[in-house]
Image: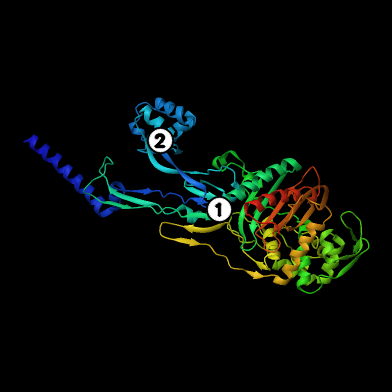
Amino acid sequence: MTKHRLLFIIFFLSYIAIISKLFYLQIINPSSVKTNYLKTSRIMPERGRIFDRNGEPMAVNKSSYLLFAEPKKINNLDEFVRKVDSVLQMGEASIEAKIDKNKNWTAIKNDVNTEQKQKLQKIGLKGIGFDDGFLRHYPESSLSAHLLGFVGKDSEGEDIGYFGIEGFYNKELVGFPGIIKSDRDILGRPILIGTQQRLDPENGRDLYLTIDKPVQEIAKAKLQIGLEQYRAKEGCILIADPQTMEILALSCLPDFDVNQYYLFSEQFFKNPAISNLYEPGSTFKPFIMAAALEEKSIKPNDFYEEDGPVRIGEYTIKTWNDKYEGKISMTRILEKSSNVGMVYISEKLGQKKMYSYLKKYGFNRETGIDLQGEAPGYLKEEFNWYPIDFATTSFGQGIAVTPIQMIRAFASLVNGGKMLKPHAVKRITSNEAKKNISFNPQSEVISSKTSEIIKRMLLSTVENGEIRWAKPKGYQIGGKTGTAQIPIKGHYDPTKTVTSFIGFAPVNDPKFLALVILREPQSSPWGSETAAPLFFEVAKELLVYYNIAPE
C-alpha cells in the first residue's frame, strides 16, 4: 500500500508540474513559446552594383561568408582555435575571445573568402559553420577612391556606405533583407509540419554614373605625373560636361585603396574636390568681368588706363609683376591678368551688385552634388565686407570656394548662362524599373549674349596670354590661370601657393570643362607654369578621345 501511495504522489506532483508549466506558457507568458520555438532568420540582400556611364564595373560584389562556431559541439577548444587561426591569421587570443561556451552559436569572422572557407572545411573541424554573404569589391582599386567612397560596418556590424557615392546613395544600394520563419523543436531542428514562411530579399539598386572610365583614367594618370613633375603636395582634376554638369572625371591625390580602406587614416577619406576650401586667385576674374558686362557697367570694347598701383584705404594693389601697359582693353585685363584692372571693373559694377552676383554664382551654398561630404564654401555676410574685401575678391583673393563650386559656376559662363546642379549618377536601375536622373537648370545667372562674349575673351586669354603654352594646334581652347597665396594665421605666406587652371573646348560648343588645382608646387609658384601645362596635357587626350576636329 505504501508503494502505491508513493507512486500516486509522484504522478500527482508530475501532473501539477505539467499543468503549472502549461499555465505559465499559455496564460502568463504565451510569447515565450514563439520566442523559443518560432525562429526568425534574416536573408541579407545583395548590395547594388556601381557602373560607369558605359556599363564598366566600378563596384561589384564577391561571394563571402560569415564564419560561426557552435561552442557546445567543440571537443577541444585549444585545437579548434589553433587550426582556425592557421587559416584566418586573426590571432588565437582574438578567436578565443569570440567563442562564448554558454551560447549555441557565435560569430567569429565576417567576409571570409571562398578560398579560406574551403581550407577550413578541408580541416574538418566540428562546431564550425558558414552563412552565405557578399563582400564589396572595387575592380579598379583606387582609380575613383574619393568619388566612390567605400563600404564599412556600422555599430551593429551591418554593411553601410561611407563617403562618396557609397555614402550618399546607401539607401538605394543596400536593399531590403528577407526573412525565414520556421517552427523548431527543443533541439533547434525545423519542424516540417510547423510554420515555414519565407520572404525573399530585395537586392539593392544598381547605379550608372556620369563618370567615363577612360576619362577618369586620363585625369588620374596626368595628375600623378603632374604632382611628381611640379613637386606639389596634393592636387585635383575635375572634368565636367558644361552643358549638363555631368561629372566625367574626378581625381584627387593622395588617395587610398578602397579595397583596403582600413589600412588608411580618416584624413585620406575626405574628398578634396567637394570638401576642401581654397582661394581661386585669377581664375575668379571672369566671374566679375561677366557680371559687369551683364549689368552693362562696362562694354566689351571699353578701355582702362593702367598707369600704376591702386590705393584702397591703407592698402596698395599692384599687378602680379608690377608692370603697367597704359591704355588696355577689357579683354587685355584678362589676358595679362591685371589685378588693378579688375579693381576698376569691380568699382564700375558696384559693391551691392558684385555681392549679389557672388550669391547667384552659388559661392554662398553647397552645390547639392550627389556625393557625401560636401562643404558649403565661405562667403561672409555683406555687412562684414570692407572696400578692400570687394577689391581683393575681384581677383580671387579673400574668398574661399570648393573646387566643385568653382567648376559649376564657371560652366555657367560658357554654357549660355545656365546654373546647373552637378551630379555623378546618371540613372538608377532595379529588377522592376530604370530611373534616369535629370536635373533642370536652377537659374540663369548671365545671358547667352554675355556668355558668348566671355568665351571669346577667354579664348583670347589663352591665345595672347603672358605665357605661350604648348596647346594643340588648330583647336580653339578658352581658359584662365590662377595663383593664390595660402593664408596662414591671418596673413599670406608668399612661399606657398595654390595654382590652378580652368579651361574648356571647343570654344564654339564646349564639350568638356576641366579644372586643375595643385597645392604648394615646388618647381614654380605660378599657375601659368604648373597647372596650365598640366591642363593642356589633359586637353590633348580629351580632344582625341571625344574625336573633336580642329577648327
Quarter that holds the C terminus: bottom right
Q: Which mark is residue 355?
A: none
Above or below, comparing residue 275 to residue 120 in the picture: below
Question: Quick one: label 2 or label 1, which is nearer the N terminus?
Answer: 2
Residue that mark 2 sits on: 100
Q: Name the mark nearer the viewer: 2 or 1.
A: 1
**Of helix, strand and loop, which one carries label 1?**
helix
Q: Choose between 15 and 95: the one closer to the eye.
A: 95
Colour treatment of the image: rainbow
Seen in the image, is 91 located left or right of residue 398? left
Residue that mark 1 sits on: 165
Farthest residue, direction left: 1
Mark 1 neighbour density, 10 Å: few (under 14) some (14–19) many (20 or more): many
Q: Position of residue 121 (x, y in %)?
A: 37, 31
Q: Position of residue 136 (x, y in %)?
A: 49, 44
Real-space Cα distance between discs 2 and 1? 38 Å
Which amino acid, by three-letter code, is at mark 2?
Asp
Is residue 25 among what the camera can see? yes
Above or below, comparing residue 485 to residue 412 in the picture: above
**Residue appearing at x 46%, y 33% in the figure:** 97
**Residue appearing at x 8%, y 37% in the figure:** 4
Seen in the image, is 427 located left or right of residue 191? right
Q: How many marks?
A: 2
Q: Position of residue 280 (x, y in %)?
A: 75, 56
Is residue 154 among what the camera can see? no
